Image (spheres, helix red, strand yellow):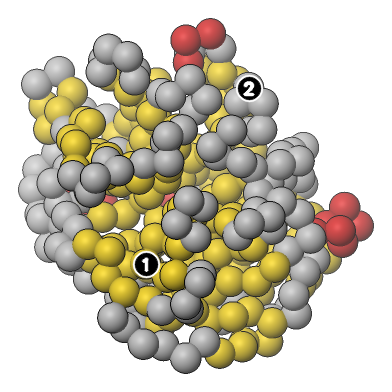
Amino acid sequence: MILDEPRLVATEWEVLDERFRPCVGDRSLQCLHTGNRWAEGPAWVPAGRYLVWSDVPGNRLLRWDETTGAVGVFRSPSGFSNGNTLDRLGRLVTCEQKHRRVTRTEHDGSVTVLADHFEGRRLNSPNDVVVAADGSIWFSDPTYGIRNHYEGDRSPSETETNNVYRLDPATGAMTVQADDFDQPNGLCFSPDEKTLYISDTARRHMRSFAVGPGGDLAGGDVFATCTAGAFDGFRADDEGRIWTSAADGVHCYDPDGTLIGKLRVPEVVANVTFGGDRRNQLFITATTSVYTLLVGVRGLNLLS
């Protein structure tokens, strides 16, 4: 067990548009844990009342227990895990950069490999993942985990493009849903799942796609360009606002693409998720630390 004494860190809410004012919450961040090399991929597990996240270069998954405040190792080694989410049955779905695969942790603790090849070729290094209401699993596959030995194993890419894939839950069939990205990264659906947002970290922007029957994507216009650093991971609240990572904190975008506000964080943010019993607790993975605070909105219910 890793013992951390939670500490409060003063923060600043920057209201750029009056539509952001109802979102404002606590005036201090609570630092739950520090000492990661690069904290990523937070996922809230409501059945257990705990947060899981990846320390990617540390090759481990960590867990914060809401009931006790304790931080412990969830899995080590973790395959240089990055993005995490839950499927509709509450099982943890994880992107493993070292093993170039997407896995699912079953309720008994065993691990099932969901995807590691496409058309006979190894994936690059799956990075982030979301699960749609129909159970389909969508994940991004940039080359970050195979470029060096810091976040995985240095290896040549076996694919011609860096893709976003969809995995059919019934058949196990995989399809390429988008292939015109430099480095696809974070992704999430709008509340009605009619829009899929995908960040391209290398290009510092986020794009929006219309989701059609069977998961076909159309459009792909730039939704927003990051004003500080680059977008990595992000999540939506239940009114469709996008809460995304940036170099100076968490940025919040209205569904019309307007940057309406910022939450300043003292470290470069990699990813966010919502949790807590009312889904109004924002968890932030930022470089070496994990922070949390209560906000004025509720995150999208990923298990509904």
Rendered view: 196 above or below 248: above
Q: Residue furthest right?
A: 18
Rendered view: 271 above or below 7: above
Rendered view: 5 above or below 30: below
Give percent across and percent down for residue 20.
Answer: 83, 57
Indicate left or right for 180 with 173 as reference.
right
Q: Closest to the observer: 67 or 37?
A: 67
Give percent across and percent down for residue 152.
Answer: 16, 57
Q: Is residue 13 visible?
A: yes
Q: Residue at x 35, y 45 (%)?
A: 92
Q: Could you tell me which secondary element the residue under label 1 belongs to?
A: strand
Q: Could you tell me which secondary element the residue under label 2 belongs to?
A: loop
Q: Amino acid at mark 2?
A: Lys
Q: Amino acid at mark 1?
A: Arg
Q: Closest to the observer: 30 or 229?
A: 30
Q: Residue at x 56, y 12 (%)?
A: 212
Q: Residue at x 64, y 42 (%)?
A: 300
Q: CA distance from mark 2 to mark 1?
A: 32 Å
**Label of residue 194 in the image:** 2
Give percent across and percent down for residue 25.
Answer: 77, 69
- Which residue does the numbered mark 1 point to in the structure image? 63
